[in-house]
Amino acid sequence: MGAVFTEFSASFGPVAWLLLIASVLILAISIERTVTLYFRPFLSSSQSDSILKLVQDGQLEAVKEHAAKASPLLQEVFGILFNQPKQAAEDELTLILAEKRTKLQQPLEWLNFFAIISPMLGLLGTIWSMSHSFHELGSSMTAGGMHKMITYLSEAMYATAFGIMLSLISMLALYCFKYRTESCLSRCELLLNRVLLSFNRGYPLS
């Protein structure tokens, strides 16, 4: 593996390091978002269904106990629902969900950045490698020189292909994580709207 990257670095110079750094960052962001959104979601569908059922059955104490064991976001949300007047609760919950959306989508901006810049880095690596091939052609017009030039030209495409591959991975990850983020937030908003309707009998709730 080390020999492969050494050869890759020799062909594409500093661009090879930039592509490697981009690939590592894309992988790190993807792993972090996968853990956050798929393995530790702030509101799963089962949690949403169980809380809504308790609310519809009027078991407010059970809702409080369930919220106390849930994610920090749900604890904060239900603390507001139970302890503040209706209008103030609605306003604060809207603000909290907007802040949560911004926080969840902030890492995705980097995936969008890498999706845009990766093909450019790949093209830059290709130009770097092609400059070597023309240097070989200029220094020697022998059969050996032509062979080296053809080899450089064939290898020059690897950087562009690698950049496009990174871009596609970034775009796919961006779409999946953005869809998951919006799905979780929509589920949370729907739950809160149903809870507010079910609790439409006076605030504060106690």
Image (tube, helix red, strand yellow):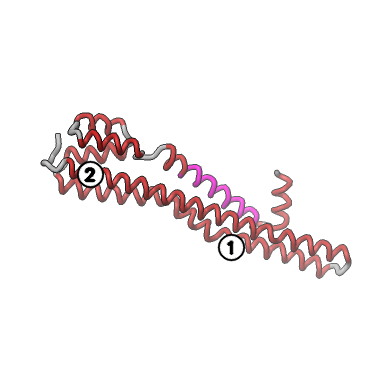
Check disc 1 and give the amino acid type: Met
Task: Say which residue appears at 74% left-offset and 63% top-offset.
Answer: 153
| Along the viewing direction, whichever of 1 and 176 lies nearer the viewer | 176
Element at badge 2?
A: helix
Residues under labels 2 and 1: Cα distance? 48 Å
**Residue toward you, 124 or 98:** 98
Residue 143 higher or lower than 80, as above or below: below
Specify the farthest residue to the left: 202
Q: Compare residues 190 and 32 and report the one nearer the observer.
A: 190
Q: Position of residue 203 (x, y in %)?
A: 12, 41
Q: Residue 135 in the image: x percent, y percent?
A: 78, 67
Q: Amino acid at mark 2?
A: Arg
Residue on which the image places disc 2: 194
Tell me the number on the disc at residue 96. none
**Residue 199: percent from left, percent from top:** 16, 40
Q: Along the horizontal axis of the image, is 54 left or right of 44?
A: left
Horizontally, is 18 left or right of 105 in the view? right
Quadrant position of the N terminus in the picture: top right
Residue 21 is covered by the magenta coloring: yes
Q: Between tags 2 and 1, which lies in front?
A: 2
Q: In which quarter of the view is residue 11 placed?
A: bottom right
Stretch of the chain drawn in magenta: 15-33
Q: Residues within 10 Å of mark 2 (few under 14, many from 20)?
A: some
Q: How many marks?
A: 2
In the image, is residue 14 part of the stretch drawn in magenta? no
Q: Quadrant of residue 166?
A: bottom right
For residue 120, which numbered disc appears in the image?
A: 1
Q: Provide residue 54's location: percent of width, then percent of height.
A: 23, 33
Of residue 199 and residue 205, the one placed in the foreground of this image is 199
Within 10 Å of the Cα at label 1, are there few (<14), some (14-19), or many (20+) other Cα atoms? some
The residue shown at (52%, 53%) is: 170
The mark that comes first in sequence, 2 or 1, is 1
